Amino acid sequence: MPYPGFSYGRLEKGREVEYERGLHLNLARLIALPMTSRLEGRRFEQLQRRTSLAVVELASETRKAWYQTVAAEEGLVYARQVLEAAEAGAELARRLAAVGNFSKLQQAEQQGFYAEAGIAVLRAEQARVASRERLTRLLGLWGEQIAYRLPERLPPLPDAADELPEVERLAMSQRQDIQAMRLDVERLAQNLGLTRTTRFVNVLELGVVNNRSNEEPTQRGYEISVELPLFDWSGAKVARAEAQYRQALNRAAETAINARSQVREAYQAYRNAFELARHYRVEVLPLRQRMAEENLLRYNGMFISTFELLADARRQVQAVDGYLQAQRDFWLARADLDMALLGTPNPTLAAAPVASAEPAAGGH
C-alpha cells in the first residue's frame, strides 16, 4: 500500500501571508497494488516451500542417522562375537604350540586373526560413537538427554519392495524444490508484466490542495503530477526483468531434469538394496546355518578340528554381519528415495562390513 504524502508551505507578499497545504497519493502504485500484492504472495509462498524443504531435509538426515546408529551398535555386538571366537582360537593354538602339537606358523595364523579381530572391534566402536554423536547433534540433545536408548535391532526387511512405476510423475507433483522454482517463475513473470506496464508511467500522483490567505478567500482544488521519462525510458529495467525471467525458466528446466534423474537413481538404488538384503536373508543365511550344523556334526564325529569349527563360527557371524549391513543400506536407500520424492536427496555411501578378515583354518 503506497503511503500518502503531505506538503505544507508559507508564503509572504507584503502584509499578505498565504498558507498552502496539500495531500497527495501515488496513484500509479495504488493501481498496481493488486499485482504487487500477488507478487509478494508468491514470494511468501516460495519462502514457505523452501522452509518446508529445509525441515524435510533435516528429518531425512535424522532418520538416516538413526538407522546408522542402530546398525553400528548391532554391528559392534557381532564384531565382539568374532573377537571372542578369535580369542578362543588363539588361546587354544598357544596351548597346543606349548606342548609341541601346533607349528609356529599355525599359531601365528590364529594370533594374527585375533589381532585383526581386535582392530575390527576398535573400528566398530569408533563407528558406533561417531554415528551416535551425529544423531545426538541432529536431535539437538545435551546433558542427561544424551543417555537415550535405541532399539537393539533395525526394523525387519519387508516382504517385497514398493512398486513405483510412475515415480517420476510422483516426484514432479510432490517435490518442494520444483514447487518453489515454479512459484519463482510465476513471480518473475508477473514482475515482468508489471515492469512493462509501468515502464512509461511510474509516478502518477493525485492530490488535494488547500490555500488559505489572510486577505483572500480560501482556495481549494486538486492537482495531478506525472513523471516524464525524458532521459530513461526503462529499457534497461525491462531487459533486466526479461533476463531474470529467462534465467528462472532455465533454472526450472534444470531442476526438473535433475529431479527426474535423482528420483530414478534413488528408486533403482532402493530396489537393488532390497534385492541384496533379500538375497542375504533367503540364500546366504540359511546356507550358512546348514553349513554350521553339518560342521558341528562332523566335529562331534571327530572329522574336523576345533579350529575348523571356530573358523566356521566366525564365517557364520560374518554372514550375519553382512546381512546387517545390507539391511542398513536398504533402510538408508528407502530414506533417500523418500527424500528424492520431496526434494534433493543426499545419498549415503555404504560403509564396509565390520569384520571381513578370515584366516586359513588349520590344526588338528
Image (spheres, grey):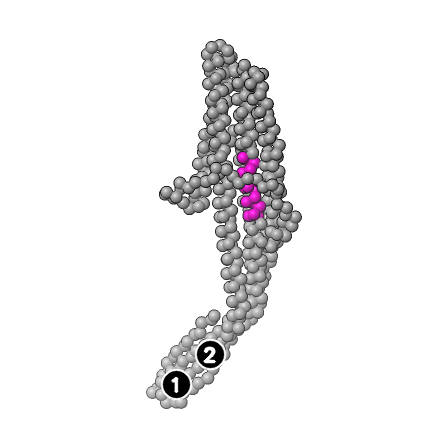
Is residue 232 visible to us here? no
Residue appearing at x 63%, y 47% in the figure: 164
Residue appearing at x 46%, y 18% in the figure: 91
Is residue 91 visible to us here? yes
Which amino acid, mark 2?
Gly
User: Where does the image place residue 53, in percent across and percent down from the top left?
Assistant: 52, 52
Residue appearing at x 39%, y 43% in the figure: 145
Crowd tier of the residue under label 1, counting other residues whose Cα lies within 10 Å: few below 14, some 14–19, many 20 or above: some
Name the residue nearer the viewer: 151 or 122. 151
User: Where does the image place residue 221, in percent across and percent down from the top left?
Assistant: 46, 84
Quadrant of residue 302 in the image? Answer: top right
Crowd tier of the residue under label 2, counting other residues whose Cα lies within 10 Å: few below 14, some 14–19, many 20 or above: some
Tell me: residue 30, above or below residue 297: below
Q: Which SS type dominates the magenta stretch?
A: helix
User: Where does the image place residue 149, in percent across and percent down from the top left?
Assistant: 43, 40
What's the mark number on residue 180?
none
Q: Dot 1 corresponds to which residue?
A: 212
Magenta-tinted stretch: 324-340
The single residue placed furthest to the top in the displayed view is 100
Side of 167 relative to 226 (left or right) = right
Mark 2 / mark 1, whichever is N-terminal: 2
Label count reads: 2
Residue appearing at x 61%, y 28% in the figure: 287
Tell me: residue 289, above or below residue 326: above
As measured in the structure, the alpha-carbon distance from the residue carrying label 2 to the one carrying label 1 is 17 Å
Side of 261 relative to 126 (left or right) = right
Q: Look at discs 2 and 1 and give the one toward the viewer.
A: 2
Which amino acid, mark 1?
Arg
Q: Dot 2 corresponds to which residue?
A: 207
User: Where does the image place residue 157, in percent across and percent down from the top left?
Assistant: 57, 40
| In the image, residue 331 lies in the stretch drawn in magenta | yes
Q: Secondary structure at mark 2?
A: strand
